[in-house]
């Protein structure tokens, strides 16, 4: 018996069978929850990375084209107030045009009867 190779027949091999589902296993609830949370967190991180890269490229391109200008807070507020006044005037004109159209339609209906 000087270190030779031993050959066994298939009758001598004992195969232990393990149950596929162990009802006493405590991980049967924890494992799916862990897997789902791991997948959701991984997806969230990857999506944030993609969004960060797209936003960085957008900011780089916009600043190169001069679309991003640094302004003071007062300039932004002044522009907003001007736009608010402009939108108020536009809304007033639209209301006046609707009222004029309704009054003309009402006058035509009265005249046609």
Image (cartoon, grey):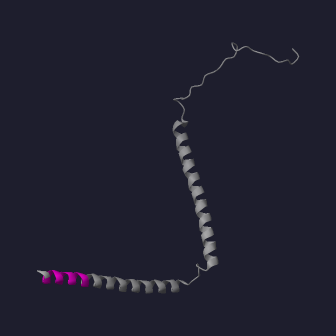
Q: Quadrant of the N terminus?
A: top right
Q: Is residue 30 above or below residue 107?
A: above
Q: Is residue 98 above or below residue 48?
A: below
In the rendering, at what x and y percent does residue 22 appear?
54, 29
Q: For this rendering, which residue is in front, 94 or 16?
A: 94
Q: Is residue 76 above or below residue 52?
A: below
Q: Is residue 23 left or right of residue 11?
A: left
Is residue 98 on the magenta stretch?
no
Q: For this rendering, which residue is in front, 107 or 53?
A: 107
Q: Is residue 83 left or right of residue 65?
A: left
Picture quadrant of residue 84: bottom left
Residue drawn at x 46%, y 83% as measured from the top left:
80
Residue drawn at x 56%, y 55% as measured from the top left:
44
Q: Quadrant of the C terminus?
A: bottom left
Q: Residue furthest front?
A: 112
Picture quadrant of residue 35: top right
Q: Is residue 93 left or right of residue 75?
A: left
Residue drawn at x 60%, y 65% as measured from the top left:
54
Q: Which residues are magenta?
A: 100-111
In the rendering, at what x and y percent does residue 37 appear?
54, 48
Picture quadrant of residue 26: top right
Residue drawn at x 56%, y 48% as measured from the top left:
39
In the rendering, at what x and y percent does residue 96 appear?
28, 85
Q: Exactly how many numbered labels are in the figure? A: 0
Q: Is residue 63 above or below residue 48?
A: below
Q: For this rendering, which residue is in front, 47 or 21?
A: 47
Q: Main secondary structure of the magenta part?
A: helix
Q: Residue furthest right?
A: 2
């Amino acid at each position: 018996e000087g270190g030779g190779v031993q050959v066994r027949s298939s009758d001598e091999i004992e195969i232990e069978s393990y149950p596929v589902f162990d009802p006493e296993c405590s991980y049967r609830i924890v494992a799916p929850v862990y897997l789902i949370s791991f997948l959701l967190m991984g997806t969230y991180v990857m999506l944030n990375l993609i969004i960060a890269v797209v936003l960085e490229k957008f900011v780089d391109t916009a600043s190169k084209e001069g679309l991003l200008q640094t302004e003071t807070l007062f300039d932004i507020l002044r522009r907003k107030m001007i736009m608010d006044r402009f939108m108020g005037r536009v809304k007033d004109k639209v209301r006046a045009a609707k009222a004029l159209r309704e009054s003309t339609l009402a006058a035509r209906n009265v005249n046609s009867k």
